[in-house]
Image: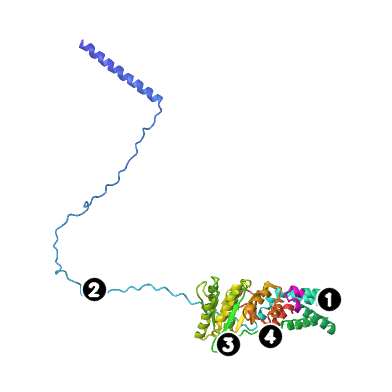
Amino acid sequence: MEFVILAVVIALVAVGAISGLVISSRKKKQLPPSAPPTAPTITAPPAEPHVGDEAETPREEPRRTIEEVGLPPADEAAAPVAVEEPVAAEPAAPEIEVPEPTEGRLVRLRARLSRSQNSLGKGLLTLLSREHLDEDTWDEIEETLLVADVGVAPTQELVERLRERVKVLGTRTPDGLRALLREELLALIGTDLDRAVKTESGLDTPGVIMVVGVNGTGKTTTTGKLARVLVADGRSVVLGAADTFRAAAADQLQTWGERVGARTVRGPEGGDPASIAFDAVKEGIAEGADVVLIDTAGRLHTKTGLMDELGKVKRVVEKHGPLDEVLLVLDATTGQNGLVQARVFAEVVDITGIVLTKLDGTAKGGIVVAVQRELGVPVKLVGLGEGADDLAPFEPEAFVDALIGD
């Protein structure tokens, strides 16, 4: 009986095992094999060493008292070393330039002048060379002169003289006409006027020159170039930057002065121009300079208040002595509008000379005649370019030769 029960138990165990194998095999067929998910590996940071972990076990050492500690000999003690503070290097002084000699400058710049004035001289010669000089031709000659800004009255004078000379002399050859035109133009411009820039006061004070003009005529640049002209002629110069309304004017003038070794007296932006002009003359006297050049602010001729201030500058400067020159800077390209400017300035300050800038950039060279007639003062300097030495003393002969060519 016991044997039968044991056999039944063994049979049941065998059937259970076989059923488990069958079910396991079916599950493997139904599900594709896949790798079991891998759990992320977490790496623990290294443990921080605790205080004293790496410390050695203190050892008992004999200790000395302060009396037992010996000091090093005095000669072995390190002497204190003085550390010098770095000294900033001073900026190198600007190199002093040697300006080009002024004598004959206009002759050297003749080609530049003749290119811009070619239409005036060549136009007149072409018209005068016609076989028949009828009324229409003379009208064309007159028109050519007016377009060149010679002015109405000087134009009429020149045309009448040319009519008479051609009729009486009967000059018809090209060389004869050129000589005739040259002679009449020189008479119109004037060869007997004193065109020298006055730099001597006759007293123990420097010659004082004030430069005036409206905005945009190149007044500050002209003042700097004039300093080069005076230095080239052997004069020592002090510059006064009395144009305090334009921020860069004083810097610009100082740069011009440094190039030729001339000192610039300046003040704060927006300061009193008359005060700066006064100080410039005072410094010029103290230094024994030959000339003091004062650059004033560019005044708009329509603003009466600013023009009155220009008169104040003149009065303050004259407390040291009389002004030797008041040069009016005019832009030759403005033509007849320059005459309006000239009239207003002449009413405020006594103009003694004219500087015509940008004369190489216009065909209206007749403004030389017109402005001299308007003010009764000579053109003393002309600007013929952007170069530092392109400001030249005005020479009537060289100017007329450039007009009519060879």
Give above or below for 24 relative to 68: above
Q: Nearer the viewer, mark 3 or mark 1?
A: 3
Could you classify mark 3 by the number of other residues whose Cα lies within 10 Å: few (under 14), some (14-19), or many (20 or more)?
Answer: some
Name the residue tied to disc 1.
Answer: 130
Structure colour scheme: rainbow
Q: Which residue is mark 3?
A: 201
Mark 4 residue type: Leu
The image quadrant that residue 273 belongs to is bottom right
What is the CA distance from the residue labelled 3 to the residue labelled 2?
72 Å
Residue under label 2, please give it. 77
Front tag of 4 and 1: 4
Depicted 57 relative to depicted 219: above or below:
above
Q: Is residue 55 visible?
A: yes
**Nearer to the camera, 386 or 406:** 386
The quadrant of the image that shows the N terminus is top left
- Circles 4 and 3: CB distance less than 8 Å? no
Say whether disc 3 or disc 1 marks the residue closer to the N-terminus.
1
Residue 385 is a magenta residue: no
Report crowding for label 1: few under 14, some 14 to 19, many 20 or more residues within 10 A (C-alpha).
few
> Quick check: can you spot residue 381?
no
Q: Which residues are magenta?
A: 144-154
Alpha carbon of mark 4 to alpha carbon of mark 2: how far?
Answer: 87 Å
Q: Which mark is residue 193?
A: 4
In this view, the mark in front (4 or 3): 3
